[in-house]
Amino acid sequence: MKAITVMPGKADSTALVDIPEPEITDIPHGRGVRVRVLRVGLDGTDKEIKAGEYGAVPDGSDFLVQGHEGFGQVVEVGPSVVEFSPGDYVVARVRRAGMSLHDQIDTPDMTTDNVYLEHGISRVHGFLTEYYVEEPRYLIKIPPTLKEVAVLLEPTSVAEKGIIQAYEIQRRLKVWHPSRAAVLGAGTIGLLATMALRNRGLQVTTFGLDEPPYLNSELVEALGAHYVSTKQTGLEDFAATDGMFDLVFEATGFSPIVFEAMHSLLNKNAVLVLSSVTGGDRRVEVPADKINLDFVLGNKVMVGTVNANREHFEAGVRDLAMAEAQWPGWLSRLLTHRVDGLTGCLEAFEHLAAPGNIKVYVEVASA
């Protein structure tokens, strides 16, 4: 079968190759689920792996199959599988369990292992191929009504985890009823976080760099949220006139904005969630004493979030379903660039940074 593979650490080694088809017996004890891949979303992580910046091959392999945002349909199940049947639509969780205590209780996103296992990223083949075989515990069942937008579930799960963590942390307050939230960044994660927060009834202001109107700002406003361009209004200026927030979700990929948010956007007892993974060695000057004082006296919290577990994927299914009911067609507008077939996949990476694109995805096969 065909697959898009890469040699991690070697720039531009991505290739379309033939690899052996996986067998249902690759999973022991009759617990295999064979999935036909239908769609795969692409993001900056895929582009960075293609550029040789990171990634790791599975044991016994000299290549890595790329793609971690998969959506597919079950075609075969092992004799001990009762959770799924042929014809079911599924999305696979990205991270698989390692050896730490957190891995053993099925929260591998919280692993303390130094080595982690992620489809299409680290030591587990991804979904830019025709079929894969997985254990039932790593699969999330998708209602047929969501099959056209289910490729968005993996990035939705990232937003869900950050928001769920915020609410879990704020249980410390005994009483916490957030009314105002800010989302920093209007890319895929920022838009999905805006959606999830609107589903929870919060007033949401989403900050993006570009001036409106453009597609992302229109999508924010379509949810009943408010879009603000930081080219036109800085965070501190906005807060001075419009007030601060109970929850701030950062998804910009621009680390300096974190420190600006820390000292200008947070109400007392507020929480700031960081979801960006940033490399490099960028340095900024910050009002350290003011930030420290405000956090101590204001009982404020900052937390980082990465990856997701079953709870977050299932929350994502619920929020996608709510969004489809409340704002029909909104999710489909995020799917801005489709590439047909694995043969066209190599060009798809070039569209990731193209103006106007939100989610680039590969249509591997028809449902």
Image: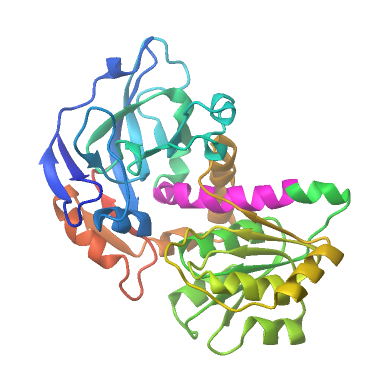
Q: Residue at x 70, y 73 (%)?
A: 288
**Point 28% across, 14% down: residue:** 25
Q: Which residue lies most toward the left here?
A: 18
Q: Residue furthest bottom?
A: 232
Residue 45 in view here: yes
Residue 225 seen in render: no
Q: Position of residue 241 (x, y in %)?
A: 75, 87
How many numbered circles are shown? Answer: 0
Q: Position of residue 284 (x, y in %)?
A: 55, 77
Quick check: 233 left or right of 4? right
Q: Magenta region: which residues?
A: 148-168
The residue at the point 23 percent across, 60 percent down is: 348
Q: Foreground: 74 or 197?
A: 197
Q: Is residue 136 above or below residue 354?
A: above
Is 250 positioned to the left or the right of 172 in the image?
A: left
Q: Nearer the viewer, residue 49 or 150?
A: 49
Q: Answer with the quarter of the image where residue 203 lies.
A: bottom right
